[in-house]
Image: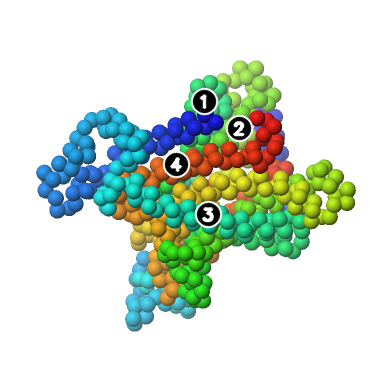
Amino acid sequence: MIARLVGILLLLWVVSTVTFVLMFAVPQDPGAAIAGPQATPQVTENIRKLLGLDQPLYVQYGRYLWRLLHGDLGRSYVFGRPVIELIVSHLGPSFQLALACIIAEAAIGLPVGIFSAVRQGTRFDRVAMVGTLVTLGLPHFWIGLFLLYVVGAQLGWLPIGGYGGARHLILPALAVGIAYAGWYARVIRSTLLDILARDYVRTARSKGLRERAVIIRHALRNALIPVVTMWGLDFANFASGLVVIEAVFGWPGIGAQMVEAVLRFDVPLAMGTVLVGALIVGVVNLVLDLIYPLLDPRIRAQG
Amino acid sequence: MGQPTRQSFLSASARAWRTLSRDRFALAGGLGVLFFVILALLAPVVAPYNPNFQHAQGLSPVGAPRGPGEEFIAGTDLLGRDLLSRLIFGTRVSLAVGVISSVIALGVALLIGLTAGYFPGTARTVLLWVINAVLSFPSLLLMLALVSVLPRGLWVVVFVLSVFAWAYPARIIYSEVLSVTKREFVDAARAIGAGSGRILVQHVLPQLVPLIVVYFTLRVPATILQEASLSFLGLGVQPPTASWGSIIYEGARAYRSAPWIFLIPGVVIACAVVSFNLLGDGLRDAFDPTSSVRRRGGS
């Protein structure tokens, strides 16, 4: 547990050092970037002094880390506001969307995969497996555009983007759900097939349990364990950057903000988002490690 | 002692080829891959027009793009350029980015995986730590961060797509090297006085070939999808160069009035990705009949 915490801190330190190096790799002078094209050299110089850019590199690095420890990610070049404020204000929508997306991918993928496993070799199984092949081959943002075109624009059933209530969530979540449901379908299918061949399933069947009970009570409970891992990892990935989907649907999450920052060369905002993303991934992984033993008694037994 | 290794590899590959040639899905995938490779190589011959030429008759009198029809089979884009020609030349870019950055990623992975697997001690500890650190990076965000400080262009895309992609294959290669070096023929080679370099190149490397071939075949489509994402955000290849993703990016602006511009490249991407995946899965089954679980190759 403590080792894991240290691991996260080490990772954050590595990522922050990488972002620091990247900020210095910028060919563009931050002072000039903030001052704007019309600024006199004196103004630019003053801004450089103000930011401490005239100090030696190791001093800047030390100050940078010190500020990070205090939650100070610097100021956005474009918006002039503290980066941390900008990111925090976009975290809510990001988490909402990430949650909706993992629900969608499981809601689509798991039933398909379970049914495929139970009816292995039937036409449904074959069609489902070819289907997952195709959806996994399509770019997820393309599925998003396709849904926007068909459901949003042609049928007019749902809003074509923007932030709002549940109605605004449906299309982006569905796009991600369709795009990645294939992984869930495949993983649960192959795990279930593996489990259905085990001895304890044969025992359950031979004591006269109905097939439905065997699958739901005995097989499925164990088959869901790898799915929970996938779920957690996806949540971490999605919350820290459903970049492209947020851009397609104009969803105001940290991913869309990241794209804007990159396009407008707002380096502090971009680097801040990377750090927060790393933090989210680390924390979610930690939480996953904590809830794993609750799900799987075998892990609990190992201590 | 080099003989047994080589012979067993040859017979293994002969066996793999037999399995592969009976796998209809893998063969279909292989044909698809061949089709796209030929299309990319022969782009100037096959494409009906110059991909960047803005045809006067490519836009309607009010400036709207033309839908698929006789003169422009796949229609035209928002600037009146022939979409089919752009798709064909885009095949070059998308495939090249996919292949080159996969080669780079696997080259680095091989170097690091071999070193970590063969040389125990500090080198291994450090390398494994680096591999795990890179694996837990928020890689998409870091890729974007890299793009934000680098000049835009094709080679930056290749670099950015390979810079984190080596970690996963490096770990796979590492564990494979670990198990290969425990086998008798490596002991035997060492016993007759072969040096580390000779053992690695002559005895360990051939054993890794199936793994590398399979991973490469599955890495290319994953990279194609990532390139499409970057280009779709306007951060990939820069206009007027076409890649599949950048065509979707340009088409997205008019997805209601000219849906074919974004629809067609998506279907093309899916065909390419599915082909590579089918071939890769087939190769894996052929090399190792016991593994049928599909692995997640990065998103």
Tag 2: residue type? Ser
Query: Which residue position holds label 4?
Result: A278
Q: CA distance from mark 4 to mark 1?
A: 23 Å
Residues at discs 1 and 2 in contact (Cβ within 8 Å): no
Q: Is residue B101 left or right of residue B208?
A: left
Between marks 3 and 1 in the image, the one whose residue lies nearer the viewer: 3
Q: Residue at x 30, y 47 (%)?
A: A82
Residues at discs 3 and 1 in contact (Cβ within 8 Å): no
Q: CA distance from mark 3 to mark 1?
A: 36 Å
Query: Which residue position holds label 3?
Result: A99
| Residue A238 % position (x, y) | 49, 51
Query: Which residue position holds label 1?
Result: B125
Q: Residue at x 69, y 44 (%)?
A: B291
Query: Which residue position holds label 2?
Result: B175
Q: Secondary structure at mark 2?
A: helix
| Residue B215 % position (x, y) | 58, 44
On the same chain, marks 2 and 4? The answer is no
Q: Is residue A217 left or right of residue B293?
A: right
Q: Is residue B63 left or right of residue A51?
A: right
Chain of the residue under the numbered disc 1 shown in the image? B
Q: CA distance from mark 3 to mark 2?
A: 35 Å
Tag 1: residue type? Thr
Tag 3: residue type? Leu
| Residue A149 % position (x, y) | 48, 71
Residues at discs 3 and 2 in contact (Cβ within 8 Å): no
Between disc 4 and disc 3, whose residue precedes?
3
